[in-house]
Image (cartoon, rainbow, N blue to C red):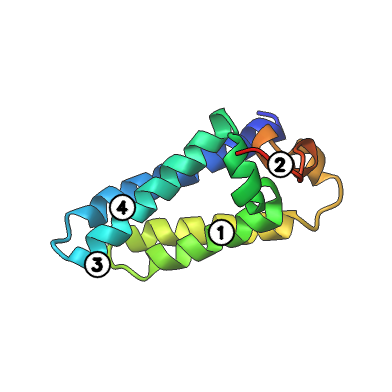
């Protein structure tokens, strides 16, 4: 497996973990947890969706998702959010946290940006998106 497909698989896996964790917490019978679960599901579907197609609104408002460092901090944030729960969701949060730390570290490895998937190449997108 080449490195580009590996990073895409990690992104899809993390998105799947978000969706799975969101559905687990959705039925926790607490309004706050259910609301948070909906946000986690939306973020998971967005992460998965970025691997398929990149809409202009994502380029304008979610530009942090197009670099290793930005995506790493996002994954680390979401991982700590999931890690705060108990049980299986905590384990899934730990996995996402590890992926986030690895992505933050990958930002500083020389030449690794060349293997980033299309959804993480910030230099392929125009930073001056005017129309959304």
Can residue 62 be seen by looking at this rendering? no
Q: Quadrant of the C terminus?
A: top right
Q: Which residue is mark 2?
A: 129
Extreme-bottom residue of the structure: 84
Q: Position of residue 2 (x, y in %)?
A: 70, 30
- What is the distance, in whole Å, between disc 1 and disc 2 at their CAs? 22 Å
Which is closer to the viewer, label 1 or label 2?
A: 2
The reply to whether discs 4 and 1 touch (Cβ–Cβ < 8 Å) is no
The reply to whether discs 4 and 2 touch (Cβ–Cβ < 8 Å) is no
Which is closer to the viewer, label 1 or label 3?
A: 3
Q: Is 13 left, or right, of 117 in this rendering?
A: left
Viewer-closest of 60 and 2: 60
Q: Which residue is mark 3?
A: 32
Q: Is 112 left, or right, of 85 in this rendering?
A: right
Which is closer to the viewer, label 4 or label 1?
A: 4
Can residue 77 be seen by looking at this rendering? yes
User: At numbered mark 4, what does the secondary structure look like: helix, strand or loop?
Assistant: helix
- What is the distance, in whole Å, between disc 4 and disc 1 at their CAs? 17 Å
User: At numbered mark 2, what does the secondary structure look like: helix, strand or loop?
Assistant: loop
Of the image marks 2 and 3, the number of the one nearer the N terminus:
3
Q: Residues within 10 Å of mark 2 (few under 14, many from 20)?
A: few
Q: Which mark is residue 4?
A: none
- What is the distance, in whole Å, between disc 2 and disc 3 at their CAs? 35 Å
The reply to whether discs 1 and 2 touch (Cβ–Cβ < 8 Å) is no
């Amino acid at each position: 497996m080449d490195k580009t497909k590996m990073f895409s698989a990690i992104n899809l896996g993390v998105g799947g973990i978000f969706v799975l964790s969101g559905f687990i917490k959705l039925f926790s019978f607490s309004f706050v947890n259910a609301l948070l679960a909906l946000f986690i599901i939306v973020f998971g579907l967005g992460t998965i969706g970025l691997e398929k197609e990149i809409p202009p609104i994502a380029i304008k408002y979610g530009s942090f998702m197009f670099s290793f460092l930005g995506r790493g901090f996002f994954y680390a944030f979401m991982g700590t959010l999931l890690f705060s729960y108990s049980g299986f969701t905590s384990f899934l949060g730990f996995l996402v946290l590890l992926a986030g730390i690895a992505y933050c570290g990958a930002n500083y490895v020389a030449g690794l940006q060349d293997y980033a998937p299309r959804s993480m190449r910030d230099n392929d997108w125009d930073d001056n998106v005017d129309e959304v």
